[in-house]
Image (spheres, helix red, strand yellow):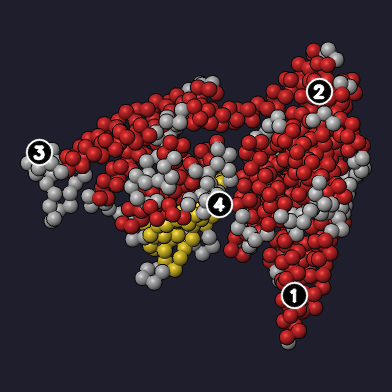
Amino acid sequence: MTSLKARFAASRELLRQVESQLGDGHFGPSPMGRLAEQTQWLARACGDHESEALACFYTLYPLVMVLPESTLSQRIDTARQHCQALAVPRALWLLDDLQVFALTMSGKHQQAVHIGTRQLRHPEAARPPFERSISLLLLARAHQFSGQLEDALRYSHRALFHANEAPHTRWLAAACTALGQLLCIETLNPEAGLPHLERARHINAGLPPCPAALLCASQLVVALEQLDEPARAHAVFTEEMARPEAAELLTGPGLVMALARLRLTQALIGVGRLDEAADWLNALPAADGSSAEHRNAVAAVMRLHLLCARGEFTQARQLALAERDRVMPHKRPLHDELALLRLLHAACTGLGDAEGAASAAQAATALCLPLVGRSTRARYLHTQLTQYPLAPAVFSVVDEQRLQAVDQAVQQAAQAPATTPELPIKTTQQPAKVPRFLAHVAHELRTPISGMLGLSTLLLMSDLDDRQRQHTHAMKSTADNLLQLVNDVLDLASLEHGQFSLNPAPFDVPAWLTESLAPYQVHAQLKGLTLDCHVAPGTPTALRADARRLRQVLANLVSNALKFTKVGGVEVRVCAVPAKAISLNVRVEVADTGMGIAPAALPRLFQEFVQADHSIAQEHGGTGLGLALCKQLVSRMGGRIGARSQLGQGSVFWFELPADAAPQA
């Protein structure tokens, strides 16, 4: 019995070691594959069905880019039948993920997207964050190769979000690399992609050398090339080549190493080491299959860089025209597509072919048009925040000072003698009404704000150019924020003076969640963030509570999360929590990947006119009223609210309220 337990524990430890190697970039015969085979053998011997089934996935994963599609599909089907007999759903889901990967690499993107989307329907509680991250990242790759950029970005952000919760650092580095690569080569946004790539490189520095680490370094070279920093890119190249086993890994077979070698060549071309770059390209081993098409397309762009740098424009034009017209099984990355057209333009210009140069420039412009429009909006907002820090689209410090002056006036009026006719006399028998002065001020503010909102809405319905539409959106956003602030002030005053009532009624949870988050989806997209929601299994779909007050609290938390998150995303989670005195509590969590909050600042977050950092008001705007209002609302509804956070690791704000399950219609 002791021996059996020891073997059982050994099989679990072997599986943990196998999982820790996923994302190392080894394809073909690999350490992970061999270790997975050992795990299968030991787990079968001791009756550990779960480890045996899960090891099936890790045995086949390194073979995705090696075996022909038909052979791989047969082996996946065989493994699936075996896992069904062992009754391990997690293993079956991982094999579906493997099918997504295989279909993507063979060019069957829509089938891959269909299966990958189906994977998201499995209950999250049944899968660890690590495996959810695998599904999301492979689905993001399928969307990327099929040209669905927005979906690829959304799922890549979610994959990184779950990878942060997992204990596997190698996979975390792989998720950071994937997102950084996507931001650099598909959205041409190296400023956003660079932090992810640098984080992945930092993680890889503490791990044994592997192909994935070199791929990360090569993507870092691409980002630095986009930022026009060739010397820094060459420094990355030099550091990587000085690492043990780097040169040996780069000469190995496989798509990952071929792509890493090709991207690193750019560092040599950027500093004028053209002969060495030519040697690197000439030493690239031959490859077959659809993955070779992807590799050859990148190789052609590198050769074009080299030919144009040498002034060999005739060959460059011939190669560029051939590549432009070549049919690809996967969508060519936008960075490479634009590089191809830019180098074609340079070759035509060097040969005096004005018509060819103009055609290449026109094609590049058409290719970039959708992205330029989105980047222009982002650049406009960035310019406003940079050049006018005291008057951003959110509420400014000047307006805060005016509001504080109004607050002081209200307090002075409230402290006036009881004979003052403008204010009611406060007694212990009757709760005081909201001061008339505050009510009048709020009314006077609401009238022009409503006019601004109405006019801006009419303007957005008219025929505007892009710049006019951007200005109008900014105006409407400012008016919305101002109106929200006025409402927050009145709500706080009503709560403090006892004028507060609840209106519980049945409502549909999914519909309420969708309606509450809808206004913030556009804001998230403009910032390049994801905004997702998840209702945990077992949560009643219909509840009885004050839906309007719940939405008010959720809106404050989501708005704050988006405001203080620059990269990544925000996720709203709803679940039911059993309680003693009532049937159940509803817990709502808003998790972000933002800047985080110092532990010392957490206790004072929910105080009025208080923010975690004094610099926040100038950089992001806001008065510190929102969280104070949330605390008041949640307390009056018999609930509690809190937060947990660490600097640089995001935050989770949560509230828990008593609610009764309502009968479904």
**Residue 219 spot, x, y in % from top left:** 74, 41
**Closer to the N terminus: mark 2 or mark 1?**
1
Secondary structure, mark 4, is loop
**Closer to the N terminus: mark 2 or mark 4?**
2
Residue 195 seen:
yes
Q: Which residue is mark 1?
A: 10
What is the quadrant of residue 19 in the picture?
bottom right
| Mark count | 4
Q: Which residue is mark 3?
A: 421
Q: Is residue 322 left or right of residue 564?
A: right
Gap in angstroms between the C-alphas marked 3 and 2: 81 Å
Q: Which residue is mark 4?
A: 649
Secondary structure, mark 1, is helix
Gap in angstroms between the C-alphas marked 1 and 3: 83 Å
Gap in angstroms between the C-alphas marked 2 and 1: 58 Å
Q: Is residue 74 left or right of residue 580?
A: right
Q: Amino acid at mark 2?
A: Leu
**Residue 459 spot, x, y in % from top left:** 45, 24
In this view, the residue in front, 153 or 241, is: 241
What label sits on residue 344 in the rendered view?
2
Q: Residue at x 25, y 36 (%)?
A: 406
Identify the residue at the far bottom of this view.
1
